[in-house]
Image (cartoon, rainbow, N blue to C red):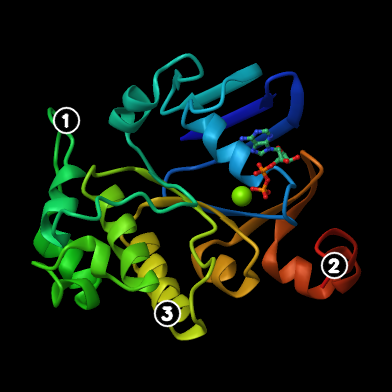
Amino acid sequence: MLDVRNIRSGYGKALAIEDVTFTLGASESLAILGRNGAGKSTTLKTLMGMTPAWQGRIGFKGNDIVKLSSDAIARAGIGYVPEERRIFESLSVTENLQTGEKAGASGDAPWTVARVFDLFPEIARRSTAPAGTLSGGERQMLAVGRALMGNPDLLLLDEPSEGLAPVVVNRLGDALSELRRAGIAILISEQNRRLARLAAENVVIMETGRIAYRGTFSELDRNPEITARLLGV
Ligand SMILES: Nc1ncnc2c1ncn2[C@@H]1O[C@H](COP(=O)(O)OP(=O)(O)O)[C@@H](O)[C@H]1O
Ligand SMILES: [Mg+2]
């Protein structure tokens, strides 16, 4: 479903990622681990057309999306939850979810406000509250819910655990496992390995803009020297 080949991107003239190559089948999930500055966010932003790919190919469901606008990429079926969890502070929780609906979405549109509330009862209880009054965890649930309202085939999550209490990270992990079972492909960038492995089976580790390791979490567990070297834990 997603075929990323040799992408290279950066900011101004400064190279940020290079030779980034990976594939993701339908309903598959992949975690991108790496220290701060390794290139995780840039990789996701390049997939979303938010930083330009200087080189390389991004195939999604058979089409090259590398030159499409972010909007067109979202409409093609990629949901994106950025690091900064963009929500509309003055709109209610329900209204925020409604802004995630994609006009003219093709085919079946399984996600509704009610279904998001089933997944995240925490925010159902706050449905009429202005989103600006939500806790960090509730905001993240709302940001994920808003992305789901676009009925994505693939969900990109950029360090969703950042700044959240462990109990909330567990909740998020449960929800992401449920989404995987529902057949949504997930590409998650994380520094929290526990959440990453709840969300994904396969893993790549980035180091200074390149993929330095690829494999499964169980392989990683058997090779602690790899995590020590690439993640410093
Ligand atoms: N908006 C930006 N302007 C300039 N350089 C940036 C910007 N965002 C990230 N970078 C640089 O790109 C590299 C990769 O960063 P990033 O993709 O944010 O890494 P990560 O998400 O893994 O922490 C780093 O060297 C970082 O300093
Ligand atoms: Mg980042």
Instruction: First in sequence, mark 3 or 2: give its number.
Output: 3
**How packed is label 2: few (under 14 Cα within 10 Å), some, or many (20 or more)?**
few
Report which quarter residue 231 is drawn in: bottom right
Q: Which residue does the numbered mark 1 point to in the structure image?
A: 106
Q: Which residue does the numbered mark 2 point to in the structure image?
A: 232
Q: Which mark is residue 191?
A: none
In the depicted structure, whether residue 127 falls above or below residue 25? below
Which amino acid lies under the numbered mark 1 shown in the image of this protein?
A: Ser
Instruction: First in sequence, mark 1 or 2: give its number.
Output: 1
**How packed is label 3: few (under 14 Cα within 10 Å), some, or many (20 or more)?**
some
Which amino acid lies under the numbered mark 2 shown in the image of this protein?
A: Gly
Q: Which residue does the numbered mark 3 point to in the structure image?
A: 168
In the depicted structure, whether residue 38 falls above or below residue 121? above
Relative placement, left or right, of 91 versus 181 is left
Give the image location of residue 66, x and y in percent.
51, 18
Report which quarter residue 104 is drawn in: top left
Q: Nearer the viewer, residue 6 or 70?
A: 70
